[in-house]
Image (cartoon, helix red, strand yellow):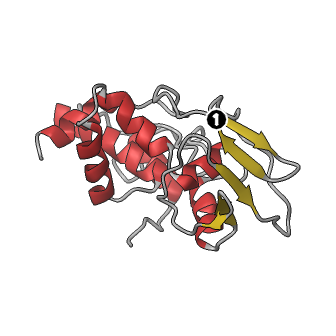
Amino acid sequence: MSRYTGPHLKISRAVGVDLPGLTTRTIEKRPYPPGQHGHARHKLSEYAIRVIETRKVRMNYGLTESQLRRLVVEARTRPSSTTALLEIIERRLDNVIFRAGFARTIPAARQLVTHGRVTVNGKKTDIASYRVQRGDTLTLRPLPAGLPEARFPIPEWLEVNRDSNTIVVRDLPDGQQTLFPVQMKLIIEHYAMRL
């Protein structure tokens, strides 16, 4: 599988918003796009705005283009496709580990999953895109360096016990809560024209 391994802060600067799942750094010092002409003002077309919204989601959650396209096709079969898309993405195993505060970024959570440190209902799972269900119990093997402090509030649909390193999925995400501003409707529209 291909994944982005380049500079993370450059992506945040390019889309113009902090992506907390991608990096712990912020664009506060340089809030303009990277490159020689980053300071220049550019009027973005509607297509460019849709591409930027798509890129935000892809880079923050570590998705490839084909993965996001498949998720959009699945979300379009549901009644509310915009909230359904976000709900599907938020249920990924690497994102659940990140949202529970057991990793500082989604790539760090993905590494925990692929190294076999996470069990789902007692079974070792090393697939980062595994989709959790309501009632699942996730257990994380203790880390030698200990768990990092949670950077964000834990969502209501997760029940986290940091003493025993367990996460219980109490409910499914509502598709409304994101850690960065994104317009899911534009992403659905972007792929609707290309499917």
Residue 189 higher or lower than 129, as above or below:
above
Number of on-image labels: 1
Compared to 26, does 120 lie above or below? Answer: below
Query: Residue shown at 44%/36% (left/top)?
Result: 87
- The picture places residue 31, in percent across and down from the top left corner, at 50, 38
> Which residue is pictured at 39% across the width and 73% down the height?
1
Q: Residue furthest right?
A: 163
- Residue 178 seen in the current view: yes
Asked whether 163 or 56 is in front, the reply is 163
Q: Position of residue 133 (x, y in %)?
A: 53, 45
In the rendered image, residue 165, in percent from the top left (x then y), is placed at 80, 53
Q: Kindly identify which residue carries mark 1.
A: 170
Say few, some or many: other residues with alpha carbon within 10 Å of mark 1 (under 14 / 14 to 19 / 20 or more).
some
Q: Nearer the viewer, residue 107 or 92?
A: 92
The correct choice, above or below, for 152 with respect to 127 in the image is above
Callout 1 secondary element: loop
Q: Vertically, is 31 above or below 101?
A: above
Quadrant in the rendering for residue 41: top left
Residue at (33, 29) in percent of width and height: 82
Which image quadrant for residue 185?
Answer: top left
The foreground one among 6 and 20 is: 20
Q: Quadrant of residue 139?
A: bottom right
Answer yes or no: is residue 103 visible. no
